[in-house]
Image: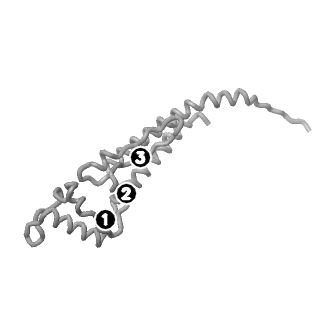
Amino acid sequence: MSGVSVKVDHSVLDKKLADAEPKLRANIARSMNRIGTMAVSDLRKNMPRDTSYMAINTTASQATQTTLEVIVTSKANYTTMQDKGTKPFWPNTQKLIESGWAMRHNPKVDRKGNELSNEAFAFLVGRAISKKGIKAKHFINPSVSTASAEFNILMRNVFNGVF
């Protein structure tokens, strides 16, 4: 039986792959950072707004050639409650008053035309939350889906011609 034998010099291939890895990692990190920026922008656009605190304090970390990771976070401790909603619970109505939320949203009069203090309004809102919970706004998943689709496109471009 006759045949053809092909031998690959692995040392040359290994050197070429080793030389390409830092460039490839840099391109991936750059693409990931672009996706992080896009995700934050999309989240900010879709977030519910009152004072813009949640939007202003939503940021993305920067990927490096070493980490290849982008983490989008919000310093607003109520981001998840706004996105996913909650079951009924009794909120801290004092925080609604101290944060200025009650003052900004208080209609100043009740249904009967009586004057409504910020404290009374905060109590009424708290009672409603204790009965109904907080309705979900669902703004995170659409932004994640958009970012994931964009990431897949960018990764195809990064790897195009490499493999």
Please say if 46 is above or below 81. Answer: above
Please say if 153 is above or below 102. Answer: above
* Residue that badge 2 annotates: 80
Mark 3 secondary-structure assignment: strand
Kind of residue at badge 1: Ile
Q: Residues within 10 Å of mark 1 (few under 14, many from 20)?
A: some
Residue 145 in picture, x, y percent from top left:
44, 51
Say which mark, if any, is on residue 134.
1
Q: Quadrant of the N terminus?
A: top right
Q: Is residue 80 left or right of residue 95?
A: right
Say which mark, if any, is on residue 72.
3
Residue 77 in picture, x, y percent from top left:
34, 54
Q: Residue at x 46, y 43 (%)?
A: 70
Pick whichever of labels 2 and 1 is earlier in the sequence.
2
Mark 2 secondary-structure assignment: helix
Q: Residue at x 20, y 59 (%)?
A: 97
Residue 5 in picture, x, y percent from top left:
83, 33
Separation (CA) of disc 2 from disc 3: 13 Å
Residue 130 in picture, x, y percent from top left:
29, 70
Tell me whether circle 2 and circle 3 mark residues in contact (CB < 8 Å). Answer: no
Q: Residues within 10 Å of mark 3 (few under 14, many from 20)?
A: some
Given residues 132 and 138, the one toward you in this image is 132
